[in-house]
Every structure is written in C-alpha cells, then in structure tokens.
C-alpha cells in the first residue's frame, strides 16, 4: 500500500503492553487518514458513558497518506479523543514535523488507552517503542520538556509532543505542544494526556515513504511549489495570519470586548503590519513548506523583555482586541505563557474576556480576581490572569481554568449569556452577528465553535452572500465546505494551501499519485461526507441534538453597534431556517441525526440512525 506505512502502534499504558497492528487497505480507502482515522477509531473504541478523563478514554494520533512526501506543507498530524471540554469528539491538528517523523519511524498512527502508573513518556524510534520514566519532567514547561528529552536521548532531531502543567492539572483548555511553537490546540487533548500520566510522545525516524507515481508527483509538485510562492499565499508569507486584523476591522467582524463589538479602536496598534515592523524577529517554515507563515515575536523592552512567542491571528485577536488589550508586548507574553504552560490561546482569550466582562459588570469583585483590576484593556492583568488560568492558581484560576462555560456555571448570575461558547468550546476570532454564515458553520461544527471545519466565513468575508442575514441556502454552503475540509484534514495538508489547488480534481490527483487509489473528485467528496458523518455519529452517541447547534445567547439577544455595524443581530427565525436547511443538505432529521438510508449509502453503522 503506497503512501502509508501500513501499520500503527497500539499502546496500553495501564499494562505497558505495546503491539504493532496492520493498517488495512479497505480502512484506508474508506477513511483516507488523519481526521477520518480519528473519527473511525473513536467511534469504534469509545463506548457511550465513558468519562473523558478516565483510563477508558482512547487517545489517538494519526498522520495522513501524504505525510513524509514532497506534497507542500504535508507534515501535519492530528490527535483525537473524547473531549473533556465538550463531551463530544475532540481533536486538533498540529503543524511542525511530528507527522512526517512518525511516518519515517514506520507508523501511520498511535492508539493509546489506559493510564500509566506513574508519569511516563512514549519513545518511538524506527519501528521500536518503549515507555520511559517522566517523573523528572512532571511540572516542567512544554519547551523545557522538549529540550530535556532531546538531551536525555542525545538526539537533537527528535520530535516531541508534550503537555505542560495545565495538562497535568487536567485543565479542559490544556493543549499539546510540539516543535516549541506548534500546538494541538483545541478541545482539551492535553488534559487527556495528563489524565493518562503521559507527559510526552517522542519520535525519531529515518525511513522513507514510497508513493505510487513518483515521477508524475515530482512534476506536479514543482508546479504546486511555484503556486505556494504566488498571490494565493502572499499575506501569510509577509505578515502571517495577523494580516487579518485590519481586514476584519474594516469589515466590522473583529471581535472586541468579549464579542460586544466588531471593531477595535486600536486595531492598527495590534495589526500584522505593526507587528512585523516592531516585533517580528524571524519567520519560520514547517518541513516541506515554501510559505513560511510562522512569525516569531520578541519583546524588546519593558517588564517582559526577552519574551518570545509565535503569533497567529487567533491568538493575537482573542488575547488582544477581544480583551480590549492593545499592547503587543502583553499579548506576546500571554501567548508565551499559554504555549509554555500548555493552554489553548483561543479558549484562554475568550475565557479571560468573559471574566473581564463579569468584572466590569460587578459580577466578579477584585477579591474574586485575587486583587487584579481585571478590566478590559489592562494588559498587566491579562498576563496575570493567563498564568492563574494555566496553573489553577488563586480564586480566579480555580474559576476559569476549565473555560468560560464552566466558569459561568459556577458564577451564575446569568453570566452564561455572555459566555461565548458552542458545545462548551470557546468561539473563534470571528464576529457572530456580522458573519452569519460563519456563525452557522461554527455552531454546527462537530468539534464545537470551530472555524476550521467548513471555511464558512469565506463567503461572508468575500461578500458572496448577505452576511447580515441567513436563509436556508446557507446550509448547503456549510455542507459543501465540511465535506471538502474533511478531505483536507484527512490527507492532512495545510489549509493555507487550499487556494493553490485549481479544483477538486487536483486534490483527487494527489490521492491517486500518492496512494495509487483510483479515485475521482466525486468519489473523494463522498469520502469526505462519510468521514464527517462518522464524527457526527460519535457525537450522537454522546447525546448531540439540535440544541447543541446554536450560537451563544448574545448572537440573538444583543444588537451590535460599532464603527461599522449599526445594530447587527441574528434573527432567531432566520437561524432556525438556515439550520434546518443545513440538516436537509446533510440528509439528517430535524434533531440533526443522520438517517439510516444515508448511513447505509455511506457504508457506516446504521444503529444510531433514524
């Protein structure tokens, strides 16, 4: 079987047993890789009623068939489990070199169950695997863990995915860091690793990946690499994703002050342009990447001098304008803390902005906040709050360590009304009321509040549709995007390269040249539909229904006024119509459950269908 290593590693942490299992061609054809393998693995191996932080939860790490090949930006990997944040499917995709390293080590993936009796890390090298003692690593930051493992194993080339103290403390916001600046960010995968006493996964491989048609793939990739250096990726190369700050501010879709507004009066101060001119020390690329989007900030003066952090749009926006903070030094420090201590920057930013609003409304006192003046715009308080969140320190840390949905449940006083979550996962950095197709896509995401499942924001931002209103046609837009993104995330290739492919036929060509599977564009998209429905079935098993596919109350109950928006709001009846249109496009019933006829057509388990 070309493109794949043809085997995966199964690890039982409770017993220490490790064994290699074959990856069947039938399964590879059916689910492709990455996201598809995660959805299928979790559905088949996690029964209803499982506690996400119990040994019975299954944590899996998968690559796609293109990892380790010459396809541009193809070294990614995905990690998945039952999410402690949402109670539904959890997963995140990380850049860096872990994916290609695992393939070079002879495995397509790792499936982990049980709980180690003491802190441990998994070491994989060219087909061999062992559990090693991590007691000296427990309590260390992700950056220190990575370096200490490399020093212990006397190999600077080892790739390490590790958790920080937040994962050890089982924060629902805990992430997994690799290559220092890359994260499996969302849905609490760091907490799952922590619950299993698994501090890190270290990988070293020197093998090759054999593809089906090397000569033709080489010729095709020459063109793809040229396109990667063209206009489709220019903004990422020059400014990184923070280029979106001023664009979104002009459109009135830049969340500020906990999504109360869609513009920020100091957007210029935190823009990608300002960041590049004043803070960026270097620009870094992932393996096999000609784009180089990773912009590394260095604080040059003030109390946080010497702070270093990789800065993307989501991190900058949600720890910046959404908290009313216009100090790039403070934002950079907040991101560094999240990365080293092991917390998702998106969830951290939204959670702290919730706490700031609660503080300004008098629902939290200064004493509740450990003496912090937690008002919007206070950069010093932002940094202190991030550290407390990551370490569960003080009253504030205990309140917010598991995200704003749970914090709102503890605080009460109707604070849930401004907890910006869906399925208890914090919202991404796109305004709800001025990007309404995006809101439908975020809210229906199987992962919760996710901008990476369908790309539904694109039609709003580009002006293809009326972004201030919804109708039943938007459901088909989300449906189409989800099916395509399921393929992108199963291959796994970087979404920043989606614009370099002329059409779906070229993506199907990648599959054919790498794997030898004779698949058409139409068949490929059907595979994407199967993968997405498999993930949805997992959620249905854990109770997902229509009520879980709505945005937070603020979207319907408060009009948004700012420099661009004049009373923007989502009309409930329009959203209901759009949601029903989405279910119809998906061939799900009114509660969002797949029909048996659809599941039979997709060759999926029909027992949960209707």
Image (cartoon, rainbow, N blue to C red):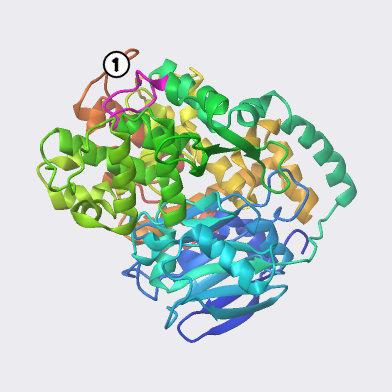
Q: Quadrant of the C terminus?
A: bottom left
Q: Nearer the viewer, residue 297 or 468?
A: 297
Q: Which residue is at a point 69% across and 73% down the rendered structure image?
A: 125
Considering the whole magenta stretch, tell me its main secondary structure.
Answer: loop
Q: Reply above or below: 225 against 547.
A: above
Does 254 appear in magenta? yes
Q: Check the picture and name the quadrant holding the N terminus.
A: bottom right
In the image, residue 297 lies in the stretch drawn in magenta: no
Vertical comparison of 251 with 173: above or below: above
Q: Quadrant of residue 175?
A: bottom left
Residue 293 visible somewhere in the drawing: no
Residue 491 in picture, x, y percent from top left: 65, 50
User: Residue 559 appears at what percent x and percent y?
Assistant: 22, 21
The residue most toward the right is 215
Residue in view at x 42 percent, y 78 percent: 115
Within the image, what quadrant is residue 488 found in?
top right
Is 441 left, or right, of 375 in this rendering?
Answer: right
Query: Looking at this view, is 54 or 168 the one in front?
Result: 168
* Count of numbered circles on the image: 1
| Residue range corresponding to the magenta coloring | 253-267
Q: Is residue 429 left or right of residue 36?
A: left
Regarding residue 509, the answer to whether it shows in the image is yes
Give the vertical position of 98 relative to 219 (above or below).
Answer: below
Residue, x 56% and y 80% (percent of image)? 131
Q: On the picture, is 241 further left or further right than 354?
A: right
Q: Secondary structure at mark 1?
A: loop
Work out whether residue 232 or residue 348 is closer to the camera in this orientation and state it.
348
User: Residue 155's x, y, as percent?
Assistant: 69, 68
For label 1, count other residues whose C-alpha is less than 10 Å away and answer few (under 14), some (14-19) or many (20+): some
The residue tagged 1 is 562
Relative vertical location of residue 219 with respect to residue 407 in this rendering, above or below: above
Give the x, y percent position of residue 542: 33, 61
């Amino acid at each position: 079987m070309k493109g794949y290593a043809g085997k995966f590693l199964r690890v039982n942490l409770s017993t220490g047993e490790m064994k290699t299992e074959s990856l069947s061609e039938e399964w590879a054809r059916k689910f492709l890789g990455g996201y598809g393998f995660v959805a299928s693995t979790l559905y088949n191996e996690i029964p209803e009623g499982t506690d996400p932080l119990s040994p019975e939860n299954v944590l899996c790490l998968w690559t796609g068939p293109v990892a380790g090949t010459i396809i541009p930006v193809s070294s990614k990997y995905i990690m998945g489990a039952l999410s402690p944040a949402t109670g539904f499917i959890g997963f995140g995709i990380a850049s860096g070199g872990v994916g290609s390293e695992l393939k070079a080590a002879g495995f397509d993936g790792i499936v982990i169950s049980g709980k180690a009796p003491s802190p441990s890390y998994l070491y994989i090298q060219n087909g061999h695997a062992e559990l090693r003692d991590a007691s000296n690593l427990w309590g260390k930051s992700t950056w220190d863990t990575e370096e200490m493992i490399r020093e212990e194993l006397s190999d600077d080339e080892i790739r390490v995915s590790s958790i920080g103290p937040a994962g050890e403390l089982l924060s629902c916001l805990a992430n997994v860091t690799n290559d220092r600046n890359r994260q499996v960010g969302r849905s609490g995968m760091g907490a799952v690793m922590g619950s299993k006493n698994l501090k890190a996964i270290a990988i070293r491989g020197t093998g090759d990946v054999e593809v089906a048609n090397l000569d033709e793939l080489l010729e095709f990739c020459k063109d793809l690499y040229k396109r990667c250096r063209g206009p489709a990726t220019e903004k990422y190369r020059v400014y990184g994703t923070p280029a979106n700050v001023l664009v979104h501010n002009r459109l009135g879709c830049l969340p500020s002050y906990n999504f109360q507004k869609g513009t920020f009066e100091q957007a210029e101060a935190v823009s990608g342009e300002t960041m590049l001119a004043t803070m960026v020390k270097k620009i870094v690329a992932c393996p096999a990447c000609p784009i180089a989007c990773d912009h590394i900030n260095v604080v040059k003066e003030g109390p946080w001098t010497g702070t270093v952090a990789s800065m993307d749009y989501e991190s900058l926006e949600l720890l910046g304008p959404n908290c009313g903070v216009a100090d790039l030094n403070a934002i950079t420090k907040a991101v560094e803390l999240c990365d080293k201590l092991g917390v998702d920057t998106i969830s951290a930013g939204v959670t702290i902005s919730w706490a700031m609003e609660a503080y300004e409304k008098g629902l939290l006192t200064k004493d509740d906040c450990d003496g912090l003046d937690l008002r919007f715009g206070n950069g010093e308080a932002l940094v202190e709050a991030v550290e407390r969140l990551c370490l569960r320190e003080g009253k504030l840390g205990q309140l917010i360590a598991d995200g704003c949905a749970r914090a709102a449940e503890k605080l009460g006083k109707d604070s849930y009304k401004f907890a910006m979550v869906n399925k208890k996962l914090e919202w991404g950095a796109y305004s709800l009321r001025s990007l309404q197709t995006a809101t439908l896509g975020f809210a229906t995401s199987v992962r919760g509040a996710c901008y990476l499942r369908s790309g539904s924001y694109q039609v709003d931002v580009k002006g293809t549709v009326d972004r201030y209103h919804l109708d039943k046609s938007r459901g088909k837009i989300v449906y189409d995007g989800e099916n395509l993104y399921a393929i992108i995330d199963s291959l796994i290739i970087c979404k920043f390269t989606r614009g370099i492919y002329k059409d779906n036929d070229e993506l199907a060509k990648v599959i054919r040249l790498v794997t030898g599977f004779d698949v058409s564009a139409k068949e490929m998209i059907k595979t994407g539909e199967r993968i997405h429905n498999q993930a949805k079935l997992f959620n249905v098993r854990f109770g997902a229904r229509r009520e879980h596919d709505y945005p937070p109350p603020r979207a319907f109950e408060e009009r948004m006024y700012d420099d661009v928006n004049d009373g923007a709001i989502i009309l409930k009846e329009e959203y209901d119509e759009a949601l029903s249109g989405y279910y119809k496009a998906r061939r799900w019933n009114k509660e969002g459950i797949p029909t048996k006829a659809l599941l039979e057509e997709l060759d999926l388990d029909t027992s949960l269908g209707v």
